[in-house]
Image: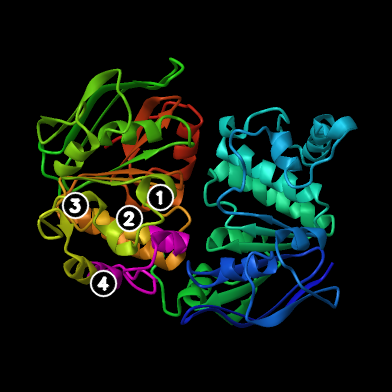
Amino acid sequence: MTLELRGITKRFGSLVANDRINLEVRPGEIHALLGENGAGKSTLMNVLYGLYDAEEGEILIDGVPQRFRGPGDAMAAGIGMVHQHFMLIPVFTVAENVMLGHEETRFAGALDLPAARKHVRAVADRFGFHVDPDALVEDLPVGVQQRVEIIKALSRDAKILIFDEPTAVLTPQETDELMGIMRQLRDEGTAIVFITHKLREVREVADRITVIRHGKIVAEAQPDSTNSELASLMVGRAVELTVQKDPPRIVEGSGLAVTGLSVTDSTGHVVVDDVSFEVQPGEVLAIAGVQGNGQTEVTEALIGLQSVSRGSAKLEGNELLGRSVKQVIDAGVGFVPEDRTVDGLVGEFTVAENLMLNRSGDAAFVSGGTVRRATLREFAQEKIDEFDIRTQGPDTAAGRLSGGNQQKVVIARELSRDLRLLIVSQPTRGVDVGSIEFIHKRIIAARDAGVPVVLVSTELDEVSALADRIAVMYRGSIIGVVPGDASRETLGLMMAGERIEEAAA
């Protein structure tokens, strides 16, 4: 099926999110929609999927105008969508999630779960997925949950598939697997819309590229375009794709010292096993590894979100473990969590309110138990300007921002205090190239100001760009520490469990 969008315009109040957009996607091709966060990519796809009504324009499939009153109409027309934030019910099984909204029944109205299980297995076998139809979604790794989303879409016999930032929460290995799945679907004749801001991925898999900026299509590009060319089209200016930094100016003896840290989960399984490391003021220590090897638990233990079975973590000689989250924050620790929507923001709160979440007792913002709204709005507007947060204003709900702009709110909040330690976990996950450049500069600026920085990232390019030293975790343990300029090959071997120590670590 051929998909065509003609003159699509979508407004939110005075904000024009999509401005007369024309787009065609043909059978058997991967058409990448490239743009910054907030450029209007996801809004356009939500119009196509029936989640939003456009003020102007029309949608055509095989030349026939369509009118979608909701996702059900879009699915009935052969359109499937794999969302950036998965639309799954955690306490349901895979089979129950796949049949949700399209329930088949047997005698006396009983759900036909055997048929749903059979269908899941058929789609999974077709693509080489290893998915148990009876597994609870909440027990599945993120990469497998995404496969469930794909099975859901394909179970509706989708001929047009929308992938909305599909690699934002995937490891490099899972990303490679997804690229292979997309190629297989394309070769079978499926029309694919691939929404992304990752230049390497779009050049690897796209057949055609459309660039959106500020709600408008600004260019059509080819996959053989350079990263610099694509980045400039996205942002509207030249973008520095490499991190510029001087050698670290390390001050010995007054940073973070972690010794013998161990964490046991609720089932009694050791997820962090006798981890020790030091981070000095003025350096970035990156903790690398495939997600799920204990990195998350290390950062959450340091901030007070995770119970610790044993060990010590001293900042400037003062113990952090055993303190409340508020006490750790008040000790000067900045924390950017890996999941901004769950741990970083309150979506129903305004941008301004989110910017003061960790400063609710600050006399600058609160007087006599009452928030000083004028002062808070002025502060928020300063941070919106300084961190280039794309929003209609300080009073906009944070949950209405694009993913990248939500991340900027979190970064702005954490870097707007006097810090003794900065912990950043997946700081650019789901963030566009222009925002990545900005966030990287702010992390390096904190390091150059003498703040010890702990960086957790599954993006090897990011680790190599920012780190002065790299500790690699595998199955809950640090198996080696290497210099920041260690090769990708070395890091890849270590992430697979091979112990390698390089000189000058």
Examine the rendering and report whether any part of residue 244 can be seen: no
In the rendering, which numbered label is found on residue 340?
1
- Label 1: state its secondary structure: helix
Q: Amino acid at mark 4?
A: Gln
Q: Amino acid at mark 3?
A: Arg
Residue situated furthest right in the rendering: 107
The residue sitting at 79% across, 46% down in the picture is 102
Q: Amino acid at mark 2?
A: Val
Q: Which residue has dot 4 on it? A: 381
- Label 4: state its secondary structure: helix
Q: Which residue has dot 3 on it? A: 359
Q: Position of residue 311 (x, y in %)?
A: 24, 20
- The magenta segment is 380-406
Sequence-first disc among 4 and 1? 1
Spatial CA span between label 4 and label 3: 16 Å
Residue 100, above or below 93: below
Label 4 close to label 1 by CB (< 8 Å): no
Sequence-first disc among 1 and 3? 1
- Label 3: state its secondary structure: helix
Sequence-first disc among 2 and 3? 3
Question: Mark 2 or 4, which is nearer the eye?
Answer: 4
